[in-house]
Amino acid sequence: MDANTGFVSNKSKDGRELKALELPGLWNGAMADWITIFVEVPIETFNPVKTVNDLLKPMHN
């Protein structure tokens, strides 16, 4: 973790614009020395779980 790192984000509450100082969390707490690359992929490659039954279906090899 890098306790000296943080960033300012824009938020709103009750229609009022705010700036928030984001302190170390998952993005910086567990991953302070990681190099992260975001890649956009086609929507058809994303297959989320739809129902609890999707999790209970046996996997076939």
Image: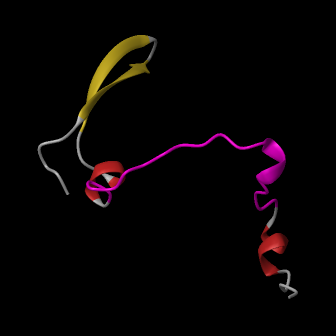
- Against 57, is 17 above or below? above
Q: Nearer the viewer, residue 3 or 61?
A: 61
> Which residue is farthest top?
16
Q: Position of residue 10 (x, y in %)?
A: 37, 20
Residue under the point 81% across and 59% down:
50
Q: Nearer the viewer, residue 14 or 22?
A: 22
Numbered range of the magenta stretch: 31-50
> What colour scheme has been applied to the protein in the rendered image?
secondary structure
Residue under the point 81% across and 64% down:
51
**Quadrant of res 7:** top left
Q: Quadrant of the C terminus?
A: bottom right
Residue under the point 13% across and 49% down:
3
- Against 4, is 53 above or below? below
Taking the image as shown, residue 19 lies to the left or right of residue 13, namely left
Q: Quadrant of the N terminus?
A: bottom left
Residue under the point 84% across and 48% down:
44
Asked if residue 53 lies in the magenta stretch, the reply is: no
* Chief SS of the magenta region: loop
